[in-house]
Image (tube, rainbow, N blue to C red):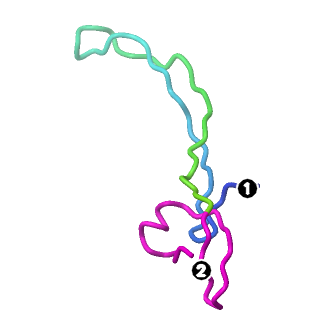
Amino acid sequence: MARICAITGKRPTKGSIINRNGQSKKSGGIGTHVTSITPRKFRPNLQRIRVKLPNGGTKRMLVSVKALKAGLVQKA
């Protein structure tokens, strides 16, 4: 199942973990250097909840917490 919010369309995005080693110039070193870059994902905070539909029915959906807090969804 794709991890996509049914209301806002939020989905996982790509990013990187950047590791830096060395002593900073500010504290007397020669500066930090990038030693490795590892890919990672930023996943939205999705919750599986029962949602009230406009026609009066209910349905289970994956909804982001940001949409819940903003009041875009009515819980059943």
**Hey, which quadrant is residue 28 in on the image?**
top left
For this view, does 57 lie left or right of residue 74? right
The magenta-colored residue range is: 49-76
Give the x, y percent position of residue 54.
61, 88
Residue tagged 2: 52
**Which residue lies at the image location 44% right of the left edge and 74% below the top edge?**
71
**In the picture shown, does residue 64 fall above or below 55?**
above
**In the picture shown, does residue 11 fall above or below 15?**
below
Say what secondary structure mark 2 lies in. Answer: strand
Residue 40 within the segment the image draws in magenta: no
Q: Nearer the viewer, residue 51 or 42?
A: 51
Q: Earlier in the sequence, mark 2 or mark 1?
A: 1
**In the picture shown, does residue 21 fall above or below 4?**
above
For this view, does 50 lie left or right of residue 66? right
Say what secondary structure mark 1 lies in. Answer: loop
Q: Residues within 10 Å of mark 1 (few under 14, many from 20)?
A: few
Q: Nearer the viewer, residue 58 or 33?
A: 58
Q: Residue furthest front?
A: 76
**Hey, which quadrant is residue 46 in on the image?**
bottom right
> CA separation, marks 2 and 1?
22 Å
Q: Residue furthest top?
A: 29
Give the x, y percent position of residue 47.
58, 58
Give the x, y percent position of residue 25.
27, 15
Give the x, y percent position of residue 40.
60, 36
**Which residue lies at the image location 56% right of the left edge and 34% below the top edge?**
16
Residue tagged 1: 2
Q: Residue furthest right?
A: 1
**In the picture shown, does residue 19 fall above or below 71?**
above
**Which residue lies at the image location 54% right of the left edge and 53% below the top edge?**
45
Q: Are marks 2 and 1 in contact (CB under 8 Å)?
A: no
Q: Amino acid at mark 1?
A: Ala
